[in-house]
Every structure is written in C-alpha cells, then in structure tokens.
Amino acid sequence: MPKRILQGVVTSDKNEQTITVLVERRFKHPLLQKTVRKSKKYRAHDAENKFKVGDTVRIEECAPISKTKRWTVVVEA
C-alpha cells in the first residue's frame, strides 16, 4: 500500500527533531455546494532540525516514532 504524502506549513519547531505541520484541505460541501476549508495539525519527524516556522513542507506517513509522531518530513515543497 502506498504511503500518503501531504503538504502543509510548519507552525511550530520548538521541540527537538519534531515540527508541527498545518495541512489544509478544500472540498465542496455535498449539500450547499460551497467550498469548505478544513485544517489539521500533524507532528512530523525532522531529524536535522532544518525546518523553521513558515516553511512549506511535504510529509510522508511512516511507522510510529513516538506517541504522537507518525509522519516524517520528505522534502521542502
């Protein structure tokens, strides 16, 4: 099964080797036909601590690294 890849913006880099990424998705409401924006935060593993707040990154699904981390940073988008 292929791993999911998402793109988002780094909102926090305060933890060691961890960044928080805000991923926004847009979709059309099934009844109202209005474009709806939903966002979710993911915690991703950043081994070299090279990403800072405001960077756009791509994250990939991986095996659990800690209690909350299930994603790793692939590349800066």
Image (cartoon, rainbow, N blue to C red):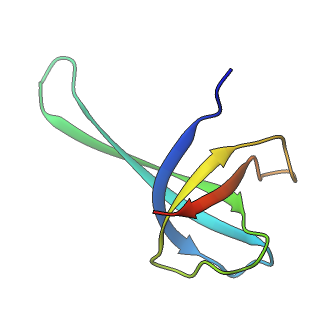
Residue 35: % across, % down: 17, 37
The foreground one among 4 and 30 is 4
For the point 72% across and 80% down, which residue is it? 49
For the point 57% across and 62% down, which residue is it? 75
Extreme residue toward the left, this view: 33
Q: Is the C terminus in the top left, top right, bottom left or bottom right quadrant?
A: bottom left
For the point 12% across and 24% down, which residue is it? 32
The foreground one among 67 and 46 is 46
Residue 3: % across, % down: 65, 33
Residue 9: % across, % down: 46, 65
For the point 45% across and 78% down, which residue is it? 54
Rendered position, 77 above or below 65: below
Q: Is the N terminus in the top left, top right, bottom left or bottom right quadrant?
A: top right
Residue 34: % across, % down: 12, 33
Question: Relative to residue 51, is residue 6 drawn left or right?
Answer: left
Rendered position, 18 above or below 1: below
Classify residue 62 by image quadrant. top right
